[in-house]
Image (tube, rainbow, N blue to C red):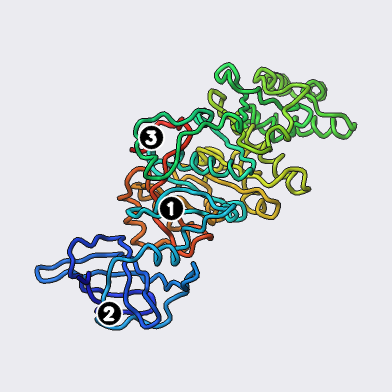
Amino acid sequence: MSLGQVSSATTRTAKIKIFDTSVRQGAYIELKHPHGPVLAQITHLSRTADSETADAALLGHSDRRGGSFRVETPPDIDAEIAYASITLIRDVLGVAARSKTGLYMGLLYKHHLKVWIDYRPLLTQHVAVIAKTGGGKSYTVGVMCEEIIKRGMPIIVIDPHGEYIQTVYQNDNPNDIARMRKFGVLPRGYVDYIREFSPDTAVNPSATPLRFDERNLDVEDIISLTTIGDSEAQKNILERAMYMVTRMHREPTIDRICDYIGKERSPAKYRLIREVQRIRTLDIFQDIPTKLRHIVGPGMTIINLKGAPEEVQHFCVAKIAKRVFEEAKVGRVPPCFFIIEEAHNFIPENSKTIASKPIYAIASEGRKFGVGLCVVSQRTARVSKSVLAQCGTHFIHKLTNSEDIQAVIESLEGFTASMAEDIQRLPIGVAVVSTIGLPHPVTIEIRPRESKHGGGQKIT
């Protein structure tokens, strides 16, 4: 039995008379057409006492070679519709292109069709993973990391809550294990592919100490680690002292900077010296700092910031992002993927942190040098729109906050009112994915993680 008939159509949309009232919004259907079946998706349903109608977006024809082409003439009036075949869906949506560059992220929602996403656009166009709290964003990033590790690409994860180290263990969550057969995955730990660094190894004893060289400090670094920015007088003294140290061709150690500050006449120098010397109590500097080559390498490096003060977190992210970008520009690090959890804390929309500038540099120019960026946040409206605008791939989980939804609409070209409605109803673990690697946005049920998830939200 036919599901319905076309009542009016253009090359982009169709009005449909529905005969089968079980048809749901979001369903993929195929319309008869002289040039071959057209894949369409139900975007809106209406019902009266006498009839039911639907609006559908026309997505394209299959070229019968695994690709698609657009609809160039409207379907015939009264053309019959049916549920779309898996082959038509696969070809038009382009979701099943398994290859050495494909990441298996899950199944097309409500269909048993694996979705593979080419990771190359992730590097060249950047990624945003967004959701309300508990919406599954970190879980999705964990799946993405598993897939990228298999491709041998270096990953750096900025982890403010110490969640990602659980990736070393295989998944033992009963709900996840029960779903694995459906998705065709098995439990697996990634202990041989994980490195962990932390500025606070008392809180994170499994981590290697993350340390920096104080001789590389600049004025902005010192201000970010102290309260000097609140005083113009102290700031001016610091700038003069730093100028004098570098003018004498000497490395700007804390002791040398304090020596030059001590030569000032202003009484503000005494508090300034105390502030600068206090930096050493943060225990993030030593004569043999962490080498960048130990951070950027095959597998995943976790920068575990759990327990570190906010100013230390910002400093660590700024220094690592800056070094990665500078070394990538001259070809001294391989292509890599830089993931920032809680991105709204490091690149806020309405203010700046010391990490903002180097992250902006990666967002705007990293693609030229093989540095991909992934920003992860539950408060999209608070993330820099300049960075979001640079993201060509979006994983959008459930959102309910109107400001966050509006931020997505402003940053994602082609995001429709229908999609804005849909993301408010998404189940946990389901995401709308828009990427340059796919011709149309698709809704994916994210596969179970092979490794253990360290976040608070489990997909059920």
Amino acid carrying label 1: it is Lys
Circles 2 and 3: CB atoms closer than 8 Å = no
Disc 3 packing (10 Å; few <14; some 14–19; many ≥20): some
Q: Residue at x 68, y 37 (%)?
A: 297
State which mark lies toward you, 2 or 1.
1
Q: Secondary structure at mark 2?
A: loop
Circles 3 and 1: CB atoms closer than 8 Å = no
Q: Earlier in the sequence, mark 3 or mark 1?
A: 1
For mark 2, what is the residue? 79
- Vertical arrangement, residue 458 with respect to residue 38, above or below: above
Q: Nearer the viewer, residue 132 or 190?
A: 190
Q: Earlier in the sequence, mark 2 or mark 3?
A: 2
Seen as rendered, the residue at the extreme left is: 49
For residue 132, side relative to residue 223 (left or right) = left
For mark 3, what is the residue? 177
Task: Give the Cα distance between marks 3 and 1.
Answer: 18 Å
Q: Where does the N terminus fall, quadrant-wise?
A: bottom left
Q: Secondary structure at mark 3?
A: helix
For residue 2, side relative to residue 439 (left or right) = left
For mark 1, what is the residue? 114
- Vertical arrangement, residue 171 with respect to residue 201, above or below: below
